[in-house]
Image (tube, grey):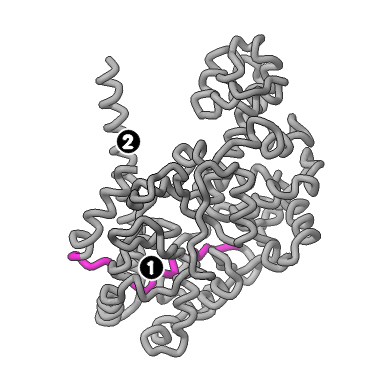
């Protein structure tokens, strides 16, 4: 029975992986079919990127890749990401031997998406525990209910951390917790029930204060760790960052243990911005975005949040849909009034004193508080948009100069009609040659499937 169950699980996992790759193919094929560019131009650009080595790409600011040790507390990791103004960082195993190659030294990549997954699930576990009243009454032990739920019930100590998994929710329900139809089922409701102690529990009380990056990395990450070598082609990196949905690509040097560069979608688009004035760039960037088939995501596919909804609901939507940002809209016409990014959760985690009354903390309240607390207020709340007749050059300039990851396309009434991401912009400049998959992706895709 155990063997049969394991085989079924493996088959299901393979189906999920195959489905993900199929979606990548569909996305990229759609992009290529919508671009109104001469075929010879596309082939020339792709061939050029295939001849440019990764070693020629500029290094990270300061020349050293920011890394986070696996035993770093999650709260400290948030501070590092925030202070360095980065979305993600490689995670290094402090116990790895000096002679280990990159496979032995690096466990993966920690980013805000992983932290959001952790925070949201913690809140949902708390909802289950709170609705039960007591763990004993529910017939479920503290370790099963989950760490945050246990703390909410007054149970603390090392054992409480044992239940911080999705299975904990199922176990709690099986124990009779769900019989109460008034139970709080999601993160915003859990936060309401916990009141002002919610963030104090997450980052300042045990066992959460000592919860490490290592403990959440495998369960709460969206993307695999797929490095390239310095002598790989930039085309490989561009395809990983576009077609294959990676947000960052670590660069290694064969025979050496450390990561020597960390190429992000944002860095690539800023690099494209620096190519203004070159013939190959200008002949594409001067075109209206409609000539490139932008926006690829139509109005009916754009997920938004009303400005009067709870801020934790916004982060929950990002979690559930695996997206990095949301347009904030107002009223039945859905006029855009702002934008949220997945990295904005750092304000909740690093400055909880600003958000003590989040029983009624709406998205708009959250954005106003950020304005009062941040020197970069213009980057946080002002809706950043473009028009359907904007040029690709203007879109790239806005993305690069504002250090943002998406721009919303709006009509004359400021209604969102589409969204353009860094991934979309990178996809405009390349296609995937038939030979490239065999030459390099045979390795890369296997790495992705194994994770």
| SS assignment at label 2 | helix
Identify the magenta region.
416-435
Q: Which residue is mark 1?
A: 427
Report the residue at 78% width, 57% height from top: 368
Report the residue at 65% width, 23% height from top: 157
> Is residue 364 shown left or right of residue 268?
right
Q: Quadrant of residue 343?
A: bottom right
Disc sitting over residue 13 in the figure: 2
**Residue at mark 1 to residue at mark 2: CA–CA distance:** 28 Å
| SS assignment at label 1 | helix
Of marks 1 and 2, the one in the foreground: 2
Magenta includes 428?
Answer: yes
Label 2 crowd (10 A; few <14 / some 14-19 / many >=20)? some
Label 1 crowd (10 A; few <14 / some 14-19 / many >=20)? many
Location of the C terminus by quadrant is top left
- Residue 59 percent coordinates (x, y): 45, 71
- Residue 183 percent coordinates (x, y): 67, 23
**Which residue is more in the foreground, 46 or 89?**
89
Magenta includes 173?
Answer: no
Residue 373 seen from this side: yes
> Is residue 357 shown left or right of residue 328?
right
- Residue 1 percent coordinates (x, y): 27, 15
Give the mark nearer the N terminus: 1 vs 2: 2
């Amino acid at each position: 029975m155990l063997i049969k169950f394991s085989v079924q699980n493996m088959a299901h996992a393979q189906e999920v992986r195959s489905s993900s790759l199929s979606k990548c193919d569909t996305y990229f094929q759609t992009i290529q079919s919508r671009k109104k560019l001469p075929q010879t131009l596309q082939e020339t650009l792709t061939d050029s990127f295939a001849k440019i080595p990764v070693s020629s790409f500029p290094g990270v600011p300061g020349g050293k890749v920011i890394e986070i040790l696996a035993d770093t507390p999650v709260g400290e990791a948030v501070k590092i990401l925030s202070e360095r103004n980065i979305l993600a960082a490689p995670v290094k195993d402090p116990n790895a031997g000096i002679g280990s190659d990159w496979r032995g030294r690096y466990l993966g990549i920690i980013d805000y998406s992983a932290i959001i997954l952790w925070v949201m699930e913690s809140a949902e576990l708390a909802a289950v525990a709170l609705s039960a009243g007591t763990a004993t009454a529910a017939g479920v032990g503290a370790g099963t209910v989950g760490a945050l739920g246990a703390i909410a019930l007054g149970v603390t100590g090392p054992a409480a951390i044992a239940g911080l998994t999705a299975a904990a929710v199922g176990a709690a329900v099986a124990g009779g917790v769900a019989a109460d139809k008034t139970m709080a089922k999601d993160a915003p409701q859990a936060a309401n029930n916990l009141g002002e102690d919610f963030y104090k529990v997450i980052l300042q009380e045990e066992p959460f204060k000592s919860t490490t990056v290592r403990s959440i990395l495998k369960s709460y990450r969206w993307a695999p760790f797929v490095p390239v070598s310095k002598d790989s082609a930039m085309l490989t990196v561009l395809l990983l960052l576009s077609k294959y949905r990676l947000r960052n690509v670590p660069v290694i040097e064969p025979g050496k243990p450390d990561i020597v560069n960390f190429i992000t979608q944002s860095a690539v688009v800023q690099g494209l911005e620096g190519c203004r004035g070159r013939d190959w760039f200008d002949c594409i960037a001067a075109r209206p975005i409609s000539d490139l088939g932008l926006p690829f995501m139509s109005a009916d596919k754009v997920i938004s949040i009303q400005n009067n909804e709870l801020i934790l609901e916004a982060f929950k939507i990002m979690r559930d849909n695996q997206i990095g940002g949301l347009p904030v809209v107002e009223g039945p016409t859905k006029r855009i009034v702002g934008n949220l990014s997945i990295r904005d959760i750092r304000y909740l985690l690093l400055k909880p004193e600003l958000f003590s009354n989040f029983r009624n903390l709406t998205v708009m309240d959250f954005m106003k508080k950020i304005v009062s607390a941040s020197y970069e207020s213009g980057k946080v709340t002002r809706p950043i948009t473009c028009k359907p007749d904007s040029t690709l050059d203007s879109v790239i300039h806005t993305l690069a100069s504002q250090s943002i990851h998406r721009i919303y396309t709006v009509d004359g009434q400021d209604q969102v009609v589409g969204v353009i991401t860094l991934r979309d912009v990178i996809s405009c400049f390349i296609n995937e040659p038939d030979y490239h998959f065999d030459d390099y992706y045979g390795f890369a895709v296997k790495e992705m499937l194994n994770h």
